[in-house]
Image: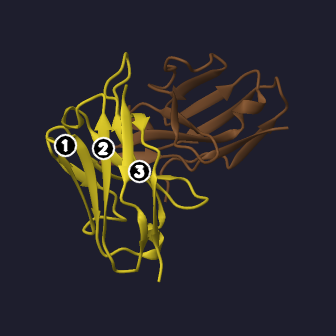
Amino acid sequence: QSVLTQPPSVSGAPGQRVTISCTGSSSNIGAGYDVHWYQQLPGTAPKLLIYGNSNRPSGVPDRFSGSKSDTSGSLAITGLQAEDEADYYCQSYDSSLSGYVFGTGTKVTVL
Amino acid sequence: EVQLVESGGGLVQPGGSLRLSCAASGFTVSSHYMSWVRQAPGKGLEWVSVIYSGGSTYYADSVKGRFTISRDNSKNTLYLQMNSLRAEDTAVYYCARDGGAIGDSSGWLFDYWGQGTLVTVSS
């Protein structure tokens, strides 16, 4: 029942670049609400990775970058490292639901 | 330092009730939008409920009428009262703080999360 759609999995070799898409609609991302991204390592709570479409909280490596266009957002990881292997979720706000919405989640595998 | 510590999870039979708590430190709960987010085993994140700083509350359709979010300002603690529990409510429940408008972001983001508490609904 997730409102935002992400690919189930992406993979890449160390050092490569991978991207994760997040597709929403006119009541969330398309309505102007920001896209935020979270990283969830196995057995831990999600951690804010990108906020406001493209901003990194203090301590997040600049290998992580985000963007937004129309009804979609995107997360890019450049210079992929073994420690980046995790689940990634996009998130926004939906005005028709009057609530927060998450993406379906993407598992990143480092080959 | 901002910290969120959940408690109250456990095993409950279908139809039963449970109250989760989230003790906050390092900030004032009543000054922020506070949410509960859950994650069923092996599944994705699902937003459950929010209480605004002004006291308004909102719920996901999946829990509306069964769950109630509240806070105790004197204890700086967030709660989730869960009634008429179903097997599909089995999940790790996280409390999370909305960081509000940061920089050029309009907000509606979770900047701090608790460690989570597991709720299992089973007979």
For discs 1 and 3, the disc positioned in front in the rendered view:
1
Residue A8 image position (x, y, % from top left): 68, 50
Q: Which residue is mark 2?
A: B23
CA gap, disc 1 to disc 3?
21 Å
Marks 1 and 3 belong to one chain: yes
**Front-most of residues B120 and B111:** B120
Under circle 3, the secondary element is: strand
B102 left or right of B40 in image: left
Label disc, if present, on residue B92 of the rendered structure: none
Label 3: few (<14), some or many (≥20) within 10 Å?
A: some
Instruction: Name the quarter where the C terminus of chain A is drawn.
Output: top right
Amino acid beneath label 2? Ala
Discs 2, 1 touching: Cβ within 8 Å: yes
Q: Is residue B120 above or below residue B21?
A: below
Q: Is residue A58 above or below residue B49?
A: above
Q: Which residue is mark 3?
A: B37
Going from N to C along the chain, the mark reached first, 2 or 3, is 2
